[in-house]
Amino acid sequence: MVSTRLLPFVTACAGFLATVASASKSASNVVDLGYVKYRGNLTYPDTVAYLGVPYAEPPLGERRWRQPLALDTARVSRQAGGEVVNVTEYSDFCIQGSTGGGDAGGAGSEDCLKLDIYAPAGAKKGDKLPVLVYIHGGGYVYGNPANWPFDHWIHQSPNVVIASVYYRLDSIGFLATPELASQGLGDLNAGFYDQVQALKWVQQHISAFGGNPSKVTINGQSAGGSSVELHLVAHESKGLFSQAIGQSVFRTPLPLPEQQKPMFEYYAEQAGCGSGSAAAKIACLRKADVSALSRAQDLVMYNLQVPLTGPYSSFHPVIDNRLFTEYPSISIMKGNFADVPIIVGSTSNETLSGGSNITEALKDYFPQLTQTDLEQYLKVYPASDFDSDAQRFQVATGESDVICGRHIIGLAAAKKNKAFTYRYNQPVNNATSVYHSSENWMMFRGTSTGFNGTTTFEPQTDLDRAFAEELIAYWLSFVRTGDPNTFKLDQSPVWPKYTTKGQERIALQEPKTNDLTISGSNAEQEPALESSRCDFVASKAQRQQA
């Protein structure tokens, strides 16, 4: 029994220890950036999610359609007033466009230039943990980083820091007309400049989260994979990353601003700004309510009178002679791209084209292809090479739309540095084919994205979760060491390097049994016929504008 004379002392000690414990707990999910302290959400005992950390000034008012300004850290500090700022909930995502499925876009905010940062609990400056910067997909038209959370990645491997980028989309991020640049009325590719600014912020501040700015891997899927490809060749991105992972690289044409002008004119008219000079229209659009812009960008996508089709009928990156001076595939095949280790791959059965007519679909996707080009496609993809007309259509369109980015980038990267390629071969929920984005469902807890930034997280089996861990281990091993094999799971096969001679890759898939202790993945040779077809696709890059 404790003496009553000692109770005040015991009580004081208990209070002190409780305070220390509380401070220790707080410190594990509070980061000090020098100009502000942020409190994140302790989503696992070893994982903190700092959600909606600003990396640039809000691109509002006159900043609409201009490069983002670097974050005014003095302003952020003043607004914090010495208090720790909570960043424990997902912030507003960027204004969404339509998915093309008949839905209307418009959800979100223009004040969206944020990062979701996931770090080990208690990580601190000096830990020098490798960093993954993730760029979401969505055709440059839609996408919400909250739909692809990384908490479980850090929980599985609490020795990396991950930052997921919000960037301006659709017309808000990629409005294009020649006068925007030539008359100094704004900046082309504003949404891509957002990504560049995010990478610059990471270079300056990720060390506070325990990250190493000299060990940054950029990673993205679909339009995010396209963004990774563009960062490899973009003049403003040099030195901002040291490794790259491109998943299902969206080989969208990069038109000239002149080729987007009809779309701009229709957009301005639909937003109520169709009168006067280009300068007058842009000034009007800057003052327009975002709801009017959202309706106008949806009308562009669905209006058949605009003399543009396919990827030309949405807002996305263009050749601007600043960031991009030639088409990315051309730059990459010339060797004019960042000399960094690379992973690049695609799913087994993806295409971004619809319909059943190969030449019509290709012409919609790549409007500059000639009749001669299209006739050559039919010869390179003869019906005799395929089991069905549907398979022929999928391969003939899908290789140009997405799949051949694996061969084109992998082959060029192998000439300069380490390269690894993959074929993702696991369908979602017993689907008959391995469609575009199938790996996202597996790697991000069964995410199934919907309209206006929404998603549904569908249940996964124990086998799915085991396979997801295998994928995450490969990815984060590459982030940590530049090699997916160093920290792979014990049961996982060695992922072979992709070389100019060997052209080996890995097929990523679940085992045919429910045994969680084995892997279904295996190394395989890139088929010679696929290689030759992708060489043909690469030869059309100039007119594909890809």
Image (cartoon, rainbow, N blue to C red):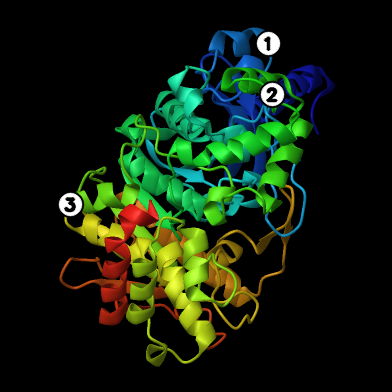
Residue 302, how many percent across, how many down?
70, 52
Q: Amino acid at mark 2?
A: Ser
Identify the residue position indicated by label 2 in the image.
275
* Residue 533 image point, x, y percent: 31, 74
Amino acid tagged 1: Gln
In the image, 480 versus 532, the foreground residue is 532
Q: Is residue 145 above or below residue 29?
A: below
Q: Which residue is mark 3?
A: 416
Residue 492, image quadrant: bottom left
**Is label 1 in a helix, a strand or a loop?**
helix
The N terminus lies in which quarter of the figure? Answer: top right
In the rendered image, the vertical position of residue 158 relative to residue 3, given as above or below? below
Q: Is residue 327 above or below residue 491?
A: above
**Which mark is nearer the camera, 2 or 1?**
2
Residue 169: give x, y in percent of width and height: 60, 39
Q: Is residue 143 left or right of residue 468?
A: right
Residue under the image location 51 percent in, 51 percent down: 223
The answer to whether residue 189 is left or right of residue 449 is: left
Mark 2 or mark 1: whose residue is earlier in sequence: 1
User: What secondary structure is marked by label 3?
Assistant: loop
Which residue: 15% across, 71% down? 501
Quarter residue 5 falls in? top right
- Gap between marks 2 and 3, in whole Å? 51 Å
Q: Residue furthest right?
A: 4
Q: Can the viewer see residue 219 in this picture?
A: no
Q: CA distance from mark 3 to mark 1?
A: 47 Å
What is the x, y in percent for residue 377?
37, 74
Residue at the image point whose x is 58% and y is 18% from the top = 279
Q: Are marks 2 and 3 in contact (CB under 8 Å)?
A: no
Q: Mark 1 — residue?
A: 79
Chain-order first, disc 3 or disc 1: 1
